[in-house]
Structure formats: structure tokens, C-alpha cells
Amino acid sequence: GEGLPRPPQTRVMVVANQKGGVGKTTTTVNLAASLALHGARVLVIDLDPQGNASTALGIDHHAEVPSIYDVLVESKPLSDVVMPVPDVEGLFCAPATIDLAGAEIELVSLVARESRLQRAIEAYEQPLDYVLIDCPPSLGLLTVNALVAGAEVVIPIQCEYYALEGLGQLLKNVELVRAHLNPKLHVSTILLTMYDGRTRLASQVAEEVRTHFGKEVLRTSIPRSVRISEAPSYGQTVLTYDPGSSGALSYLEAAREMALRGVEASIAVEYDPQGE
Ligand code: ADP
Ligand code: MG
């Protein structure tokens, strides 16, 4: 694919929003595929017991498949469960099976219950440019594990009336995890999804989000597109299902923006005399 600058170190990005149906999974798999098509090595970690990201990437996730549950609860190495995604070079997936639903409870009594995913990612030896973690629609221990493992939070926002409602709770959790468990954590990216610029409501919400968050909001927004919603039932991302569609092009562009920003951010840190 077309080359983009690679990040100097692996960027671990947590795709979160405790609201369901806002486009977390769609954004995770399509950004990941876009980054891979741009030449990066990318791992998707499916952290939702529904396993929608695994399905969308064409990865088998019936109950017997080695999965992220085994990594979190049984301390299996991540490399034992990672599978290559068919048809997209450089893209990999750690699938979720339904037993992950029980992990939320099982983790409570385990040592280092908040940092099991972080440890697993750190011990993973294959070179990676990006890890994208698809979170469940809740703020329990699974999402906390993602927030401890990552440095960047990516929040997809659907441009509808209640878009900003409930985000306060997510931001508070990000702040708590940053203060107590993971000082690197910050909201780096906001992506407007299912955007219909023809409706007044969508453009009002978009403006509100841009005013509230500013530079974190990607310039590219993702349009509502039937091709995007059809792709998962073929076990594909929209990037291979319909590469020329507006949905595919918008995710490619969003991924490009994300990649370029990451490199700018790391350069800014290098030149900051007070930086670490
Ligand atoms: P979440 O993971 O936050 O629950 P999903 O990514 O599963 O959300 O998206 C919810 C539903 O909306 C899915 O049926 C998905 O196919 C659909 N969807 C997501 N993004 C778009 C889009 N840009 N255009 C059309 N449908 C979309
Ligand atoms: Mg989902």
C-alpha cells in the first residue's frame, strides 16, 4: 500500500465509548485495515464478548477458539491467540469468544486484575506499529484493562441528539485511570461517525463536539454508508468489500490523519525542553 510514516514506537489505542451502537467496532476494524493498507503492522484486540470485531475481520471465534479470554484469565501469551486477517497484509486479530462475558467477574479475584492486558501486550514480541482495542459498551474491568494498556483513547461519536451525554462518565474514568494507574493515558482522537451533513442536527452536533474538544477531533468524519454496514456480514472491512466507496475512502483518510498526527506529536515531544 501507499506508505505513511511509521510511529517511532507502537501506538496502543483504545476505542471506547460506553454507549452501544456509536461505531466503536466499525471504527476499530476499518481504521485498523486502513492503517495496514497504508503499510503499517496492526493488531486488533477484540475486548467485547459479542466478538463483533472478530466477525468483521473474518476471524473464527466460536467457543473453542483460543481467545483474549485465555490471555486475560489464564495468562496465555498473546502470541498463542493472534490470527492473521485474511486478505489484508499486516493486519492481525486477537479474537473474543463468548466466555469473555464471564471475565468481567473472574478478573475481580485475580492478581494485577487491571493490568493483565498491558502485561500481555508488553510481552508480545512481534513488531507492531499499532494496537487497536475494541471495547465493550461498559466501563467495567475489561475497559479498565484497555485503558491501562493504552496511551491513547479514541472516541467515536455518533452525530445525534444525545451524543455528548454519557461522555462525562468515560472522561472521568480516563482521568481516574490516568491519575492512579497509567500516567500516559490521554484522549488523542475523536472521530465523528455516521455523519449526515445534510441534516441540520448532525452539523450542529459536529460543531458542538469541535467546540468542546478542539484539536482532538479529526477533520475527516465518517459518512453514513450502507457499504460500511454491509461489510461485516461478509467477514470483511469496507476496505476490501468496496474499496472505492465513500465509506472506505473516509476511513483511509481518517487513518492517514491519525498516522500523521501521531508522528507530529512525537516530534513535538522531542523538541519540548520540559518533555520526558
Ligand atoms: P458499537 O461497536 O459502538 O456498538 P458498531 O460499530 O457495532 O457500534 O455500529 C453499530 C451499527 O451501526 C452497526 O450495525 C454498524 O454496521 C452500523 N454502522 C456503523 N458505522 C456506520 C456508518 N458509517 N454507516 C452506516 N452504518 C454504520
Ligand atoms: Mg462494538
Image (tube, rainbow, N blue to C red):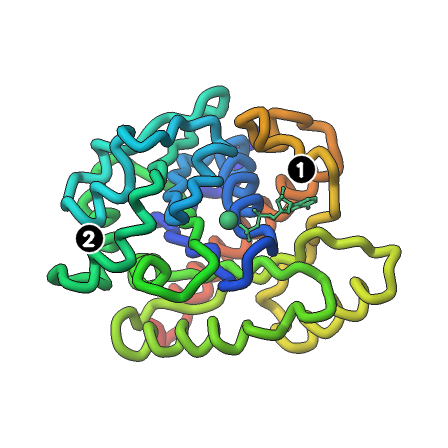
Residue at numbered disc 1: 228
Q: In this view, does 227 lie to the left or right of 275?
A: right
> Tag 1: residue type?
Ile
**Farthest residue toward the top?**
87
Q: Is 263 above or below relative to 227?
A: below
Q: Is 64 above or below relative to 270?
A: above
- Which quadrant of the structure image shows residue 149? bottom left
- Which quadrant of the structure image shows residue 211? bottom right
Q: Is 120 above or below relative to 59?
A: below
Q: What secondary structure is marked by label 1? A: helix
**Residue at position x 86%, y 59% in the image:** 199
Residue at numbered disc 2: 119
Q: Which of marks 2 and 1 is in front?
A: 1
Residue sitting nearer the eye, 5 or 189:
189
**Residue at position x 34%, y 37% in the image:** 94
Q: What secondary structure is marked by label 2? A: helix
Counting from the top left corner in percent of width and height, residue 99 is at 29, 43
Counting from the top left corner in percent of width and height, residue 249 is at 69, 37
